[in-house]
């Protein structure tokens, strides 16, 4: 009898526990199926080197709006230069907010990834006119300006060059050779090679279709012909004071003392200043000799922009976050932490920014720069052309033949 009572008691207790467990599980399930309607899930793409900066900015955003919604904001590193390729792989599930280089704007707009932004007048009033232009297609604003520093200029070591020396690339190459040193430039990229063609009357750009290019770099007419530039480049390539190297090679040469001047951008300013100390100098690009004339070197100007995915499920909040990332306070923070030049007008004229030699050099060069609007067929033919010049023309083709081949590739459909 005792065993029977215990058995019944045990079954009763077990049933109670099971019922209790079922009720709790059912409650949890209900909560999972009915999430808080105020929860906002956003994904942000930005450069890997900007991770700490973006985390601070995102934390500030969540604090500012904590009373209005519950946020789950995910940061994922994504290079600005190939943001479009990553986004196009799965546009509808891509980042809600993303940083990208301005030369990708046309593709993003044509693909429907971006729509006209809100608060246009406020954005225009707050940012440099050139950055607004870079964020626009046919005078319609499609993205928010973030930086105005994606260009290049001249770094030089004051221990070797005077302010008069840096006006002439020919003079700089001779000085470098005298000291068994180098002046560097990256000819593997058409982005930099443009500087030698851009102020000669020879042209390159994007056709109205937004995809193909026009190019007259092989022109046989005018005061300066394509072969004149090609010959100047050949002479430069053969000079013992010149070296073509990429960013990593430039920094390595600066640090080990073999490179005493070079063409690069603000992203290297901290490292170069640390290496050269009191000798650190920065200026607009110099002129070079072409067809017996002094030609001021030009540059592509570039801007980083913030885009808002047109397919975002929380577009209103994505817009608020994009505006937060690009506001005056956070552009100033970006400059202080990352040394990136602001597009915000107030920050750009601040004492901190104006005292930056690199930013000042970029602004000086801006007089001789233009927006990069180039189709994808531009890059590879230019690299092939410069590789042949740097190698001393082993193929044996004339300069005109090499130019014709390059241009044919650039304008290919």
Image (cartoon, rainbow, N blue to C red):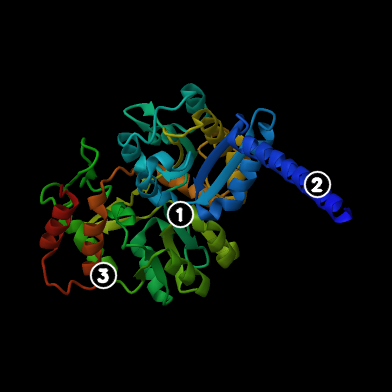
Q: Residues within 10 Å of mark 3 (few under 14, many from 20)?
A: some
The answer to which image quadrant residue 393 occupies is bottom left
Q: Which residue: 60% across, 32% down?
A: 34
Side of 228 where 318 appears, left or right: right
Give the spatial CA distance, label 2 vs label 3: 87 Å
N-terminal-most mark, 2 or 1? 2
* Number of residues whose C-alpha sits closer than 10 Å to that of mark 1, classed few (under 14), some (14–19) or many (20 or more): some
- Residue 336's disc is none
Residue at (61, 38) in percent of width and height:
32
Q: Nearer the viewer, residue 40 or 229?
A: 40
- Front residue (pair 69, 299): 69
The image quadrant that residue 402 belongs to is bottom left
Q: Name the one closer to the observer, 49 or 14.
A: 14
The kind of secondary structure element at disc 2 is: helix
Q: Residues within 10 Å of mark 2 (few under 14, many from 20)?
A: few
Residue 341 shows in the view: yes
Q: Which mark is residue 390?
A: 3
Q: Position of residue 3 (x, y in %)?
A: 85, 56
Instruction: Kindly identify which numbered label has been placed on residue 265.
Output: 1
Q: CA distance from mark 2 to mark 1?
A: 74 Å
Q: Which of the two marks, 2 or 3, is nearer to us in this view? A: 2
Distance between mark 1 and mark 3 Cα atoms: 23 Å
Residue drawn at x 47%, y 44% is 99
User: Does any portion of residue 354 appear in the rendered image?
Assistant: no
Q: How many marks?
A: 3
- Residue identifier under label 2: 13
Residue at the spot 45% in from the left edge and 45% down from the top edge: 364
Contact? badges 2 and 3 (CB < 8 Å) = no
Circle 1: element type = loop
């Amino acid at each position: 009898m005792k065993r029977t009572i215990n058995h019944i008691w045990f079954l009763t207790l077990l049933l109670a526990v099971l019922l209790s467990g079922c009720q709790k599980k059912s409650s949890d399930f209900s909560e999972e199926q009915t999430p808080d309607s105020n929860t906002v899930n956003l994904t942000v793409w930005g450069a890997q080197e900007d991770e700490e900066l973006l985390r601070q900015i995102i934390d500030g955003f969540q604090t500012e709006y904590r009373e209005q919604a519950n946020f789950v904001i995910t940061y994922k590193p994504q290079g600005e230069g190939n943001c479009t390729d990553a986004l196009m792989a799965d546009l509808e599930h891509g980042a809600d907010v993303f940083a990208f280089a301005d030369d990708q704007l046309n593709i993003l707009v044509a693909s429907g990834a971006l729509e006209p932004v809100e608060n246009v007048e406020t954005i225009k009033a707050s940012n440099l006119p050139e950055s607004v232009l870079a964020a626009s297609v046919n005078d319609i604003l499609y993205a928010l300006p973030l930086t105005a520093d994606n260009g290049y200029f001249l770094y030089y070591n004051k221990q070797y060059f005077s302010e008069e020396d840096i006006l002439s690339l020919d003079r700089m190459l001779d000085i470098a050779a005298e000291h068994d040193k180098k002046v560097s430039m990256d000819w593997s990229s058409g982005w930099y090679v443009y500087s030698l063609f851009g102020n000669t009357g020879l042209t390159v750009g994007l056709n109205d279709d937004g995809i193909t290019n026009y190019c007259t770099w092989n022109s046989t007419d005018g005061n300066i012909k394509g072969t004149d530039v090609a010959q100047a480049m050949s002479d430069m390539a053969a000079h013992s004071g010149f070296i073509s190297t990429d960013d990593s090679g430039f920094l390595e040469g600066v640090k080990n003392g073999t490179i005493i001047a070079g063409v690069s951008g603000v992203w290297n300013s901290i490292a170069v200043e640390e290496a050269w100390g009191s000798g650190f100098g920065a200026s607009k690009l110099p002129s070079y000799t072409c067809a017996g004339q002094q030609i001021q070197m030009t540059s592509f100007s570039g801007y980083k922009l913030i885009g808002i995915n047109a397919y975002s499920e929380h577009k209103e909040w994505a817009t608020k976050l994009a505006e937060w990332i690009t506001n005056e306070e956070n552009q100033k923070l970006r400059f202080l932490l990352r040394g990136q030049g602001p597009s915000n007008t107030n920050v750009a004229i601040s004492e901190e920014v104006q005292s930056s030699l690199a930013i000042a050099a970029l602004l000086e060069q801006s007089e001789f720069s233009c927006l990069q609007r180039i189709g994808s067929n531009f890059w590879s033919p230019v690299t092939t052309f410069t590789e042949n010049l740097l190698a001393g023309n082993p193929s044996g083709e004339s300069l005109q033949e090499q130019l014709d081949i390059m241009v044919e590739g650039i304008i290919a459909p």
